[in-house]
Amino acid sequence: MEDNIQLGADVFNKMMFVLETPVTQDNHKYYKFMDQEMQEIADNIWAMPAYMKEDDDFSMFFIITEIESGETVIAFSEGSLQDGNFSLGEPMVSGKGLNILNEHDEKRASSVLHFLNQISKAAEGNWRMIED
């Protein structure tokens, strides 16, 4: 694995953030980003805005869920509003979502990365390289 992988680098698209424990009704309030709080949008699937502004059609959401391996990951999903209905797109790998956000708003992407790195420093999650 490469050392010192930076936000915006192509290789960052292959980075996934894995939580040590699942998000639950008991602990979801510990994972606040800015003034946003996690919401359970389906059984064991949690979402929270990472970027959403009134005057901008682009939005990005944290998606926290368990994957096939049994690990709980923080992925990202773009939001869209069509015909008055809001929906989330297909979840994407953590690094890819951050790179897309970085193309749209570098400052917010850096804030989201800092948030995830704080979770890592608290030993509650870590970055992993995924395979193709």
Image (cartoon, rainbow, N blue to C red):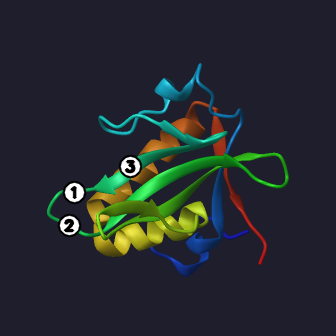
**Residue 72 x, y percent position in the rendering:** 71, 44
Instruction: Give 10 or 39, whichever is nearer the viewer.
Output: 39
Check disc 2 and report its element: helix, strand or loop. Answer: loop
Q: Nearer the viewer, residue 76 or 43?
A: 43
Disc 3: CA contacts within 10 A as few (<14), some (14-19) or many (>=20): many
Amino acid identity at mark 2: Asp
Q: Residue furthest top?
A: 26
Q: Is residue 6 visible?
A: no
**Vertical arrangement, residue 36 with respect to residue 87, above or below:** above
Task: Give the Cα distance between marks 1 and 2.
Answer: 5 Å
Q: What's under tag 1, amino acid-wise? A: Lys
**Left or right of 105, for residue 88:** right
- Residue 29 in view: yes
Q: Alpha-carbon distance for marks 3 and 1?
A: 10 Å
- Residue under circle 1? 53
> Mark 3 and mark 2 in contact (Cβ < 8 Å)?
no
The residues tagged by marks 2 and 3 sit, at their Cα atoms, a distance apart of 13 Å
Q: Whole-percent x and y of residue 20?
A: 71, 36
Q: Which mark is residue 56?
A: 2
The relative height of residue 110 versus residue 27 in the rendered view (above or below) is below
Do the residues bearing badges 1 and 2 touch, measured as CB atoms within 8 Å? yes
Q: Which of the 4 image quarters holds residue 44? A: top right
Question: Total marks drawn?
Answer: 3
* Residue at mark 3: 49
Please tell me whether mark 3 sits on a helix, a strand or a loop.
strand
Q: Position of residue 24 (x, y in %)?
A: 63, 28
Query: Quarter holding the C terminus?
Result: bottom right
| Secondary structure under the numbered disc 1 in the rendered image | loop
- Amino acid type indicated by mark 3: Pro
Sequence order check, earlier mark of 2 and 3: 3
